[in-house]
Amino acid sequence: MLPHSRAALVRAIAACAGCREAQALHSLAWKLGLASDVVLATALLTRYAKRGLLSAAQRLFDEMPRRDVVACNAMLAALGAAGRAADARALFDRMADRTPASWNAMVTCCCRAGDLGSARRVFDASLRAGSSSVVSWNAMIDGYCKAGRMDAARDLFDRMGSTLPDVVTWNTMMAGYLHGGEPAAAIAMFHRLMHIHQQQQQEEEHRPRPTTVTMATLVSACTQVGDFALGRQIHLQIRQQGTRVDAVLSNALMDMYFKCGSVDRALDVFRTMPCHPNLFCWNTVIAGLGMNGRGEDAVAAFRDMVEGARNRRQHEVKPDAVTFVALLSACSHSGLVAAGRKLFADMLPVHGVPPQTKHYGCVVDLLCRAGCVDEAARLVRAMPGRPNAKVLGSLLLLDARGPERQEGGVRLSEWAARRISEMDLGDGAAYGLSNVYASLQRWDRVEEHRRGVRAAVRHGKGTRRKQPGRACYDLASSCTN
DNA sequence: ATCGCACTTC
């Protein structure tokens, strides 16, 4: 076996995308008598782990005649990615020598398992061992960010001083603030980054440079605070400076333009994308057209997504559950009853996406708005699981449309109201329904409902309500129509 | 050869 052939094989393994290719290369390596080659086996191990095939990775590791630190690091990461924190820990403790990668893998593994205390102890130990790098800091900061502990993240960030943070550190902090509901703080971080970048004290190559990821995060922050003027300015700057635009950044820009009502600019970004649109992009376009009252165009975009892939046989993008929420909501907002009904019926048989409660919610909403009360009632009865707040909220709105009745003579809205009073009141959407009652001037029920909410809060239910305002907005805006 | 951090849709 020539050395350069072996190197070619290793390169091929590292580059291969699917597990089929990995398996083929695996058997090839076996035939060439390279089954016990640690470097090859490590490359293969990583491929298997990346495809979620942990047992195949574990077998390769166990059968290695000798395991060096690189192989151990690969296995450590494989265990961590699979959520096997205890096994990763056991391996880590058994390792005779450790590289910075070992420590990093362990920090990330603990964070992913939600064990920030252990993560911090490993991180501190890596500092003491002199085996840390900027990546260790980034991994630990990201762990705090993902856990919503921005105070701890900020504390670590401040302790890094002025030269250690790299662009990933800044991106991590910005993303942390953005997801933590502090988009203004994310924007402030960006301004600070630019300030530092413009200072001449640091060497050119050591100055953190904003990347595509930075810009995508920044644009999202602008959207979230509603500062479209800044967002527009950022977009112009991106164009001017020739910043690389990828699917993620395009998506963030489209989302911004759609949310401020600039449909043409959003579609312009879509059409001039330098790469093929991925699932996120299509979902953004469909949702964006829908929220701007362009239901027909949303349905047309969906057709492009599905049929475009079929006709051109390239870059196939299959719709997912989010696509159908966007699509059915678009139909609902534009009153496309027949189209919505058909798309809903096609979900599983044609597109292979099983309808969930949220999809039923969209269709019930669609039918109620169109006055198809009996059909809506049948659908609610046929749906699997309990109707959620969105479904019941739609039915409740019938109150505002006149005295619609079910076959049993019971008002559908009354029935919905009763189901709502039985709901888990910690649910943000259920909480939001009390606003619906208010706008329908059902004060008796408002009081009843809010007593229930207070009782639920006292009993510790729903202490981590996520964005109750979103559900309120949706329902309340429907009410005013 | 391995590891590890950042981004977008409802």
Image (spheres, coloured by chain):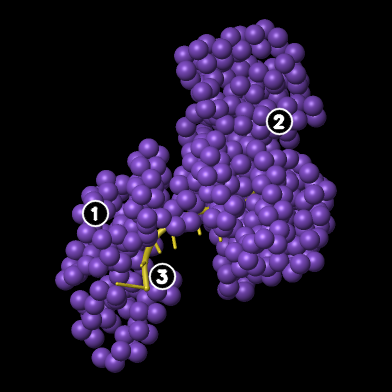
Chain colours: A purple, B yellow
Between A225 and A378, which is closer to the camera in this rendering? Answer: A225
Name the foreground residue: A326 vs A273. A273
| Chain letter belonging to callout 3 | A
Are the residues tagged 2 and 1 within 8 Å (C-beta)? no
Which kind of residue does numbered mark 1 sit on? Leu
Q: Position of residue A44 (x, y in %)?
A: 32, 71
Q: Which residue is mark 1?
A: A91
Identify the mark nearer the N-term, 1 or 3.
3
What is the C-alpha distance between the residues marked 2 and 1?
A: 50 Å
Position of A27 with respect to A52 (left or right) is left
The picture places residue A136, in percent across and down from the top left corner, at 44, 53
Q: Earlier in the sequence, mark 3 or mark 2?
A: 3
The answer for which chain carries disc 2 is A
Task: Give the labeled residue for mark 3.
Answer: A18
Figure quadrant of the C terminus of chain A: top right
What residue do we see at 29% from left, 59% from top? A98
Residue nearer the viewer, A409 or A342: A342
Q: Quadrant of residue A369?
A: top right
Q: Secondary structure at mark 1?
A: helix
